[in-house]
Amino acid sequence: MGAKAQLNVQEGVRSVHLSITGADGAQDLVILDLEFDGIESSLGAHQGEVGLPYTGVYSVSASLEGRPYHSQAGYIDMSLAADGSIEGTFSADLVEDPTAGTEQPFEILPSAEVRGLSGQFMGQWQLRCQSRLPGHRSFMLGGDYCDSLEF
């Protein structure tokens, strides 16, 4: 699967978020989400367990055949290089979102009914960096902080 990735960095925020997006055909979409403890730990090889979204571990979400899914178990094994390349493999047990097609919020819970999904990916990553506006609490894309980052 071809992949695009975005490394999200924000001045003053220690955690760095990586979102890897891959599409297979016109209807299916897979998004791998990873968190790193600081920009200095983002490059290189990474292996981690996949869990439920928003639990502090890696997670996977997908739209398969028009139905939304989220992960509850699995793994991601990937490498992020300074030259802008990314590659890896993943495997996830996916659970269909319980209120698909409605506006109702739902609680993300483990389920016995899972759909397995695995694959490999390669592609390019881009940096999305935000600096604080001088004298403000809000952020802007780019800026002095972002210009000083080195990989």
Image (spheres, grey):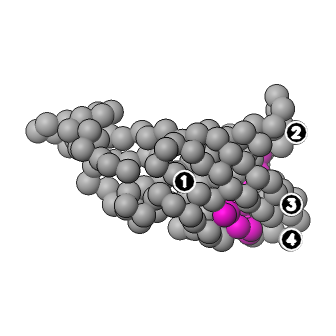
Badge 3 or badge 1: first in the primary sequence: 1
Q: Circle 1 is placed at which residue position?
A: 80
Badge 4 or badge 1: first in the primary sequence: 1
Residue 97: x percent and y percent? 76, 52
Residue 112, label in figure: 4
Mark 1 burial class by Cα count in 10 Å: few <14, some 14-19, many 20+: many
Amino acid type, callout 1:
Leu
Residue 65, label in figure: 2
Residue 116, label in figure: 3
Q: CA distance from mark 3 to mark 1?
A: 25 Å
Tell me whether circle 4 and circle 3 mark residues in contact (CB < 8 Å).
Answer: no
- Residue 56 is a magenta residue: no
Q: CA distance from mark 2 to mark 4?
A: 21 Å
Provide the secondary structure element on which disc 4 rests.
loop
Badge 2 or badge 4: first in the primary sequence: 2
Q: CA distance from mark 3 to mark 2?
A: 14 Å
Residues in magenta, as a range: 68-77
Of tags 4 and 3, the one toward the viewer is: 3
- Side of 23 relative to 55 (left or right): right
Q: Tell which residue pokes out farthest to the front in this image.
A: 83
